[in-house]
Image (spheres, rainbow, N blue to C red):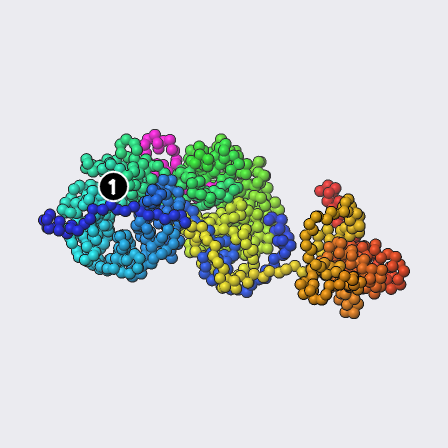
Amino acid sequence: MPSRATFANAHKGRKQRRTPGFFFPARSVRHELRGTWSGAVGGRVSVVARPPPRKAMSSEGSSREGGSALFAGFRALGLYSNHLAHVVRFHRRHREFYLVTAVGKSFHTYNVKRLGLVAVSNALPQDITCLAADRMLVFASCGSLLHAFARNKEVVHTYKGHRADVHLILPFGDHLISVDRDNILIIWDVQSEEEYLQMNFDKTVFAVSAIMHPSTYLNKILLGSEQGNLQLWNVKSNKLLYTFPGWGAGVTVLQQAPAVDVIAVGLVSGYIIVHNIKFDETLMKFQQDWGPITAISFRTDGHPVMAAGSPVGHIGLWDLEEKKLQGQMRGAHSTAISGMTFVQGEPLLITNGSDNAIRVWIFDGPGGSGRLLRFRMGHSAPPTKIRYHGQNGQQILSAGQDSTLQSFSTVHERFNKSLGRGSINKKKSKRKGLRYDTMALPPITTFATEVARQSDWDGIIACHQGFLSCTTWNYQKGSMGIHKLTPQDFSKNRPLGVYATAVDISSCGNFAVIGLSTGHVDVYNMQSGIHRGRYGKEKAHEGSIRGVAVDGLNQLTTTAGSEGLIKFWNFKSTKLVHSINLPSSPSKMLLHRDSCILGIVTDDFTISVLDIETRKIVRKFSGHQGQINDLAFSSDGRWLITAAMDCTIRTWDLPSGCLVDCFLLDSAAVSITMSPTGDFLASSHVDDLGIYLWSNRSLYSLVSLRPLPPDYEPSVVTLPGTCPAQDVDVTEEEEEISDEMIEYDSPEQLGEALVTLSMLPKSRWKNLLNLDIIKQKNKPKEPPKVPKSAPFFIPTIPGLIPQYASIEHENGGQQSKVVNLGVLAQKSEFYLKLEEALINSDYKSPLRILKDMGPSNTEAELRGLSPDGGGSVRVMQSFLRMIEATLTTKCDFELAQAYLALFLKLHLKILSSEPDLLAELSRLSPQLEEIWVHLQTLFNQSLCILNYMKTALL
């Protein structure tokens, strides 16, 4: 072993300097099932054709690229932490600490003061394997690549050179040190992204397991190994300065102590060594019996305390002056402590673990132990059942395999709440001082919720895996309720294999219906917990109950049994009303109360839709290739959404009975639920702790729900990240694919036999006969007074239609003061078109011109058709033929009536004296009378039917 003088030589050149503060940048339809359906939006009917079989292209939630046409990935809820250690940074300008945690492919940034989410980084291609930060950048490894993030958001540098996954990162001034699984250490230049130095270590001799930079040791790093020895290296000269023999166990953690030259070493054996590296002298040695040391941190607020984490979630607090154990924080996390940091100069300890929790502890009480100050927590085990709570679509209740019931807000994380874990007897466990886990209930398999009376008593009922009793929960109190609903027959003698399988709550919130594996179905009062009835004489079904449902008016209770029967019971009298035999055993059941539609999933992977009023199956769907895990109705009852073990989520359109949307996921969805407002679809997945939200595209864009062919191959859609999805510019390829949507405009006339009205407003034709009266009423009492300084007037061309004169027209010749009478007698465009129609029999053009005119111009044009107004009998004859042609096509019916009435009013004397005009009228009159008689017959029939429906006793 070298002497102190020899080792001191390796210590030369170090500078006494304070670690700079971290820099944090600024935050940058039930009735439709019985008939056909059609829909129109804005006067336009959208019709789509069945496309040929096609294979969709892979995408990330984009319908244009072949993903889901109906749902787009929005964001993930309930993800806060994983097995990677967190990073604490300090913002100099804000004078505030920030916490960075890795979550899947991105990382979150929280402020320590309130644990509020400040920023979410852009997602990486794979999950983050290691996390570190300096005062400017956040470094994250993704496989063999290293990425540097600026402003906690976007990637600014990428470092390529490793051939194996990176598992250790250390920011080192202007450089970055990384170690991969092949035991290769690379030093990078942060700005240029170039390799500065590469060091290879033999795994059998020195497998790097920990890395740190000793404070004030210039250009030096300390490496810990799985073999137990430590090495001190000068990275500038690439020299090994000193080797520490170790303590006979692998090194897991290296942590700098507040004192210079002193470090803490955590070992696999559970020992913690406080060592002076300048003189290679062990100062203290502690041992924890909970397994390897996972994290170490020192208090810096004047108390000589060291905290050490363990794989079982306990934290040990060690007094460095007394060299003894000061306290224990048992059950700080339900899994291993991933990271642990004392906030600089404050009595706050930040911990995170793989149980998906971040906790801040404060040491302000006697005894030196910390109490929980604030936390962010999700499920530590995958969720098994999710349902929206309430009608506002802002809260999602989730039951997980960790036996907890939690509520996640879709608005903000501060509205999240945990209802805790179910316990067999909370009072007994607290009184006897037993651990909470010893009397914990099994995970919740299914639950039902109702908000009608949740302010008065419990509004949630849940059944647990393999457990007979059902528990009630209070959402407002955020805890388990006071009742455990157990059938009287099994209250004393509880046989094995009897457990609750299905639950439901009435819409009034007063009653709970519970189905058992024995076939019994019982009704309980939610307020008192008293048993109120049982369906059937002995039992409701011969087999196990697979589902129960109560309608919205508490009239019918529907039950499904494993023997293949669907039974309808009178809710109040508990008598059997009707039963339906299914071809296969049902596995799940869901009722849409507003439309009285029941969705039934059977074991042969088919879905049946049953109308509980007519008690008939109205739709059947098949297509899933695996067990159907869950189903959900849209808020209007139009869509049925199903999720199965074949990793697909399918949307079925109930009115048309077609599959309209399907997309494939990396992992199968265990549970799905649709928002009551229809804006989001929520899903939970196998071996995934998060709840994922999918936005409904039909609410904000035009969606073409074409029927999908039977051989449709869905594409894989990536699950959304924790950051809300951003809008993406449409590319040329996307525009081409979007052209597949065929938009069909309604024709001007749906059928030749139908009388069609124009789209003109009533003001254009309704008051044509009374136009002179309207003008008389609107006539001013006094003539308008000319102002003293009259403004200039733009010159106009004389004629019926006002047109402004151009400069060339105005200055084309010498202006004469003599009025040209020939100009006043010029023919209008409408007049000319009527003359042309006498030759080519095209009356659409003059009618189109007349439709563009207002009431006053229309009257002026019709007055000018008579010989007294400058017209002729031939033109009047052409106008009557135009009306005849319009009535023949039965288009613009109301305009033809209004124009003809005004024409007869203006020219009655001339019509009676001209034989040609009388001949035209004699041909027009029978045609007009025939149409009106037909319309009057239809009106009379409709009125008779309507009167009968209003007065008949049905």
Count of numbered circles on the image: 1
Q: Give the range drawn in magenta.
A: 423-448
Split into 4 quadrants, where in the image is the C terminus?
top right
As helix, strand or loop, the secondary structure at mark 1 comes to strand
Residue 831, quarter of the rendered image: bottom right
Front residue of 814 and 906:
814
Residue 882 at x, y percent in the picture: 78, 62
Give coordinates of residue 174: x percent, y percent: 27, 54
- In percent of the image, x 71 and y 66: which residue is there? 813
| Image position, residue 621 (x, y; %) | 54, 55
Q: Residue at x 38, y 40 (%)?
A: 114
Tell which of 426 and 280 is nearer to you: 280
Which of the 4 image quadrants contains residue 195?
Answer: bottom left
Q: Residue placed farthest to the top in the image? A: 431
The answer to whether residue 544 is above or below residue 523 is: below
Q: In this view, does 34 lie above or below 473?
A: below
Name the residue located 73 percent from the left edge and 47 percent from the top edge: 785
The reply to whether residue 114 is visible in this rendering is: yes
Magenta residue check for 252: no
| Residue 630 in sight here | no
Q: Mark 1 points at which residue?
A: 298
Q: Which residue lies furthest to the bottom in this view?
A: 839
Instruction: Look at label 1 and name its amino acid.
Output: Phe
Q: Residue at left 54%, top 51%? A: 699
Tell me if residue 434 is in the magenta stretch.
yes
Instruction: Locate residue 545 relative to residue 210 in the image: left or right.
Output: right
Q: Is residue 27 left or right of residue 752?
A: left
